[in-house]
Amino acid sequence: MKTQVRIKLYAGLLSTVAVIGQAHPGSEGPVLPGPARNAAFHDRGNPDAKKVELGRLLFFDKILSGNRTISCATCHHPLAGTGDGLSLPFGEGSNGLGVTRDTGSGDQAVPERVPRNAPPLFNLGAKQFKAMFHDGRVRVDSTQPSGFLNPAGEELPQGLDNVLAAQAMFPVTSGTEMAGQAGENPIADASAAGLLAGPRGVWAKLAARLKRNREYLTLFQQAYGHINGRSDITFVDAANAIAAFEASAWRADNSPFDRYLRGETKAMSRKAVVGMRLFYGKAGCGGCHRGPFLTDHSFRAIAMPQIGPGKGDGPSGHEDFGLERVTGIPADRYKFRVPTLKNVALTAPYGHSGAYNSLEAVVRHHLNPVDSLEAYDPSQAVLPPRPDLDAQDFIVQSDPLLRNDIAAANELAPVSLSDRQVARLLDFLHALTDPDSIDLRRDVPWSVPSGLPVFD
């Protein structure tokens, strides 16, 4: 049965999204995607205001973590481009926000860094996004009772609005991220025991917390007409609201490039247009980063440096096999999701492990992945220090045999660009920034219904 599920998932991951192309406005040039329209999004440009507001408060409320010390926003903060500015996040046990976050201390110190970079959340309310997480382990699957495949374990409950809501079910179940460690709280105990669904599971326990809060009870009733009492609130309702907030607040489709696609031929600078031609031409970026969201939603191995604790793979336990962990297919080792490039200039560090701290550095990695892997400078990583964690961070990268394995899986051929051409490519990537995404202070509430602090 597990083999059948893996094969089904793999087939789904290889499916492509049809994109209607158009010629370069005004002249012959690269075939460009059509612009994103309201119909491309689950809410079709008409979000439910009450549901969005409930989701906003839940997103910033530490009530959803085991020890009530961390929220979704801790690792996906509007002031850090919906990430956290770190190569690898710290979950329960640490303190502070963004690059000021520490590793905790004493009995409450974090046991490890979160193994993968906190991905940005821009445009994930678009229907094209059918798989979530760097390895795509949660994805749309109409053959499943819930509508979503979760190869990580327990069946998802029914009633989830979309795959973004399905994704929102999982950070609260991770001991490293939000649940905490066994023995610290009932949520952590359920997580450690593998109890997610059911009356004794993580989701039921978190729903019970929300039910005890009178303000949340009112907000849930206002957002969902079917809720007539505390017993009706489920964590699926919370996940749907969080997804509605993320989809509405962080839709980003009004960049200079988006406007250019809509026919405003002067929306981009001349340098950015030159960079666009390189992107879709000599540089070859458009092969994987295509469509209105500049991703083909595939999974590729590009010799990205592996830093941090890893996912328990390989003899050392510090490797991260990526898509292979989901499909069970050895040829998928070291493959990770091709990310959207919308707002890419706002979302450093880059790569599944956050190995590169600048946009130029990660662009240059793509031009010659194997040489870049060999020449990787560890100082580029943004990792708040702690001696025991530091000792694990570069175990894989420091091992020539493991680097050779990562290099051997690389799928990108070298591309030769001059420094000037790289500069033009960067001009184009900066033209993918939606001005409305630069200042997101409006998304942060002053307070949340639990009364827990929002700003630490």
Image (tube, helix red, strand yellow):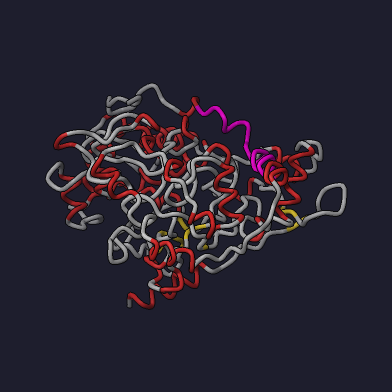
Of 76 and 348, which appears nearest the observer? 348
Identify the image quadrant of residue 259. top right
Position of residue 131 measured from the top left corner of the image (x, y, whole percent)? 47, 58
Position of residue 8 measured from the top left corner of the image (x, y, whole percent)? 44, 73
Left or right: where 69 falls relative to 33:
left
- Above-or-below relation of 348 to 291: above
Q: In which quarter of the image is the C terminus?
A: top left
Verify whether residue 428 appears in magenta.
yes
Position of residue 205 measured from the top left corner of the image (x, y, whole percent)? 21, 45
- Above-or-below relation of 150 to 383: below
Residue visible at 46% across and 66% down in the picture: 142
Left or right: where 175 falls relative to 303:
left
Of 51 and 102, which appears nearest the observer? 102
- Above-or-below relation of 159 to 104: below
Identify the image quadrant of residue 291. bottom right
Residue 232 visible (yes or no): no
Residue farthest to the left? 183
Position of residue 169 measured from the top left corner of the image (x, y, whole percent)? 34, 50
Left or right: where 230 falls relative to 381:
left
Q: Give the range drawn in magenta.
A: 425-440
